[in-house]
Amino acid sequence: MTDNMPRSIQSGPDLSAARIARRNRSERWFRQLGILAIGSALLMLAVLMTSITSKGYSAFWQTQIAINVNFASSDVLPTEKVNFRGLARRSIRALFPDVKSRRDKRALYKLFSNGIGYELRDAIQRDPSLLGQSKRIWVKASADTDMLVKGFIERAVKQSDRRLSDKQLTWFDRLEKDGRIAKRFNLTFFTQADSREPEQAGILGALIGSILTLSVTLLLVFPVGVAAAIYLEEFAPKNRWSDVIEVNINNLAAVPSIVFGLLGLAVLLNWVGLPRSTPIAGGVVLALMTLPTIIISSRSALKAVPPSIREAAIGMGASPLQTVSHHVLPLAMPGMMTGAIIGMAQALGETAPLLMIGMVAFIVDVPGGFTDAATVLPVQIFLWADAPERAFVEKTSAAIMVLVAFLIAMNLFAILMRKKFERRW
Amino acid sequence: MIKKTIALAAIALTAIATTAEARDQIRIVGSSTVFPFATAVAEQFGKSSPFKTPVVESTGSGGGMKLFCAGIGLGHPDITNASRRIKNSEFKKCTAKGIRITEVKFGFDGIVLANSKKTAALKISKKQIFQALAQKVPMNGKLVDNPYKKWSDIDPSLPATKIEVLGPPPTSGTRDAFVELAMEGGAKKFPSLKALRKKNKKAFKAIAHAIREDGAFVEAGENDNLIVQKLEANPATTGIFGFSFLDQNGDKIQGALVDDTSPTFENIAGGKYGVSRSLFFYVKQQHVDVVPGIKEFVREFTAEKAWGEDGYLVDKGLIPLPAADRKMISSSANNLSQLNM
């Protein structure tokens, strides 16, 4: 390069074919590098998604077993008085009259979910006309049976190392031969909250918890963040104080999220007295965490509005407030929404600050409001990943799929809103 | 729009402040090892009683004690779980706040070293565990940085593979118990360290509890079912976790024999297996008639159908207490007898 310099100075731009070829080559290189970068990012995403989907898709199906239940008319309503567990067990034993010993009976029951008594109760509450009839009813298989059907328990393994004994396998084979085994869509996964029994566990509680928590976060953080950004960008005098504030906001954005959890514990729970493990407390903590992100992105959205718009408005006699609210804010809104959605996505995936305020918890009831105990999607994933039962492995991946779907839905909503508000000049 | 959202937020906040107090749900905190058992009981309790299902948090034994001993009142938890006994210092903190405690020991848990079924099971002594994992080991009369790279460097009878152990992080109760039972137990086998223990217990513990940091011990998640997958993928590695994981994954992994005893249900229950611990929960007596259902919850937990030999907790990997102990503890627990230390 350096030996070319003097000549190019003497004779103007060097337009030799060699140099043009070199420039074109480097341009091609750069483009290819860019494509490569995008390609590798997409590849990683594809690997991640396929690995999660391939592990998790089976959780959307659940093995069910058909049993004949004789709802004798002695099982009269009210249903609280009836021993549905006993009824379920009688029905199971009727299928296998040859199973006699107590031990064998217990082993037999283990092919079925231990919640089938409640299933029968629900069935009769839904349809009281079942009373006095004998009916074939599909009930949930236990998680172990489910794993066998899905191929996660191998028959070839030694009996002592298997979750199901040889006897249980022959019983299962008999059920299968009679056409009593079927894989059905796992509705429970979408209609129930957490459970210790994998076949009864669902994601709804965590999903509702996430929605409640994020709505608290959004309601708090969006108005506050936007107002702070507008003041700092449009009204605040440029002096040492505003510099200090700006630096601090940038620093706050880099604070590890667990710190906000500690803050939440000390201030919100112990001092303000918000109830533990609730969406309201979680939402406030996550709002504190996402506030800097939203302020920063809202400010850059405001900066992107050309000054000519402001000058024109002021030139037409608008007050500074009118300038901002009538002209600058509508134009900056799409950018602010993008920022808000990034902040919300960050809040959606957070577990660390929630640990401190008691949201990493086992909660069986679907939360009904902002003050009910609740957990959120990433916490549910974390809890299931920690569970020893093998059936929770697929549930973990399925929960991740639900989380990703929720994220995509949120982004889609933001894009639609942005399209609606977008103005061109 | 902005006005509306601010108004909504304000309404939401005021609504909360008014409903913060009353509580009709038991709150449980504590050990992540006890978590699978406490949640199973909580769920059964919720289904079979008129009370709401208790909320169980997984905070770790130490974290749970801290919350539990913070005070009396509905803002504080009613029960805490622990994978070790309450410490003297924690008990003092609790009594200082006027808290009266009922202690319930409800079962055992074994800590296992396990590897993939694709290779032979490890046969190891506590002394060898210490040699494999301690930061400093005694050699030729003085303490040196752990020089062992392969298992066979420690003893020719062990496999000639690299020492690579996946274990729980320092915050976990499993780690505490492993260090106390296996590492300390192994360190005591060295005469020089044994002498040190008599002279200066603190210095001994510092040596016995320090786990090497040169890559041979990898901190993995605590009781993580991903560890099982990692062990399967790499048969040369060994993992440390609770018995329930071995119980659930017996087709893929096998427990190492520690001092010639394999970690089976019978050996742990009979007290033969050396690396096992007791599991506890603690009840705050002052909350008993304030929060509905605590007495009934204790009864559910200490019922034969839960913690007995055929109980549902055994399906979850709990190792039950001997029948006589169960009888004694259940009566003292249901009478809410007070813990004194």
Image (cartoon, helix red, strand yellow):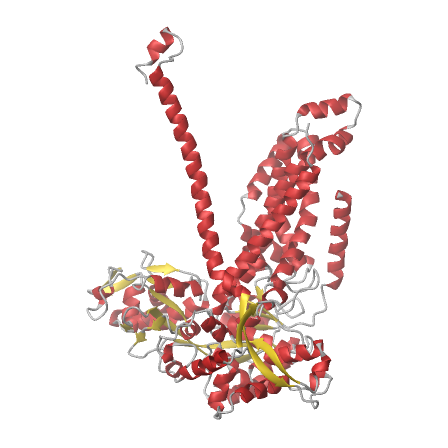
Horizontal and vertical percent for residue A225?
67, 42
Name the residue at the top extreme: A10
Question: Splitting the image into 4 quarters, where does residue A194 fall?
Answer: bottom right
Q: Is residue B185 left or right of residue A125?
A: left
Q: How many marks?
A: 0
Residue B85 appearing in the image: no
Name the residue at the right extreme: A317
Q: Residue at (59%, 85%) from the top-left corner? A: B334
Q: Nearer the viewer, residue A106 or A304?
A: A106
Q: Is residue A119 above or below residue A13?
A: below
Q: Nearer the viewer, residue A284 or A84?
A: A84
Q: Is residue A110 above or below residue A34?
A: below
Q: Residue at (56%, 81%) from the top-left corner? A: B301
Q: Is residue B176 left or right of residue B123?
A: right
Horizontal and vertical percent for residue A34?
44, 35
Q: Is residue A21 above or below residue B202?
A: above
Q: Is residue B70 above or below residue A127?
A: above
Q: Nearer the viewer, residue B270 or B127?
A: B270
Question: Splitting the image into 4 quarters, where does residue A17 fall?
Answer: top left
Q: Nearer the viewer, residue A397 or B263?
A: A397
Residue B132 appearing in the image: yes
* Quadrant assignment for the N terminus of chain B: top right
Horizontal and vertical percent for residue A102?
49, 91
Q: Is residue A38 left or right of residue B288?
A: left
Horizontal and vertical percent for residue A161?
37, 77
Question: Splitting the image into 4 quarters, where does residue B211 fall?
Answer: bottom left
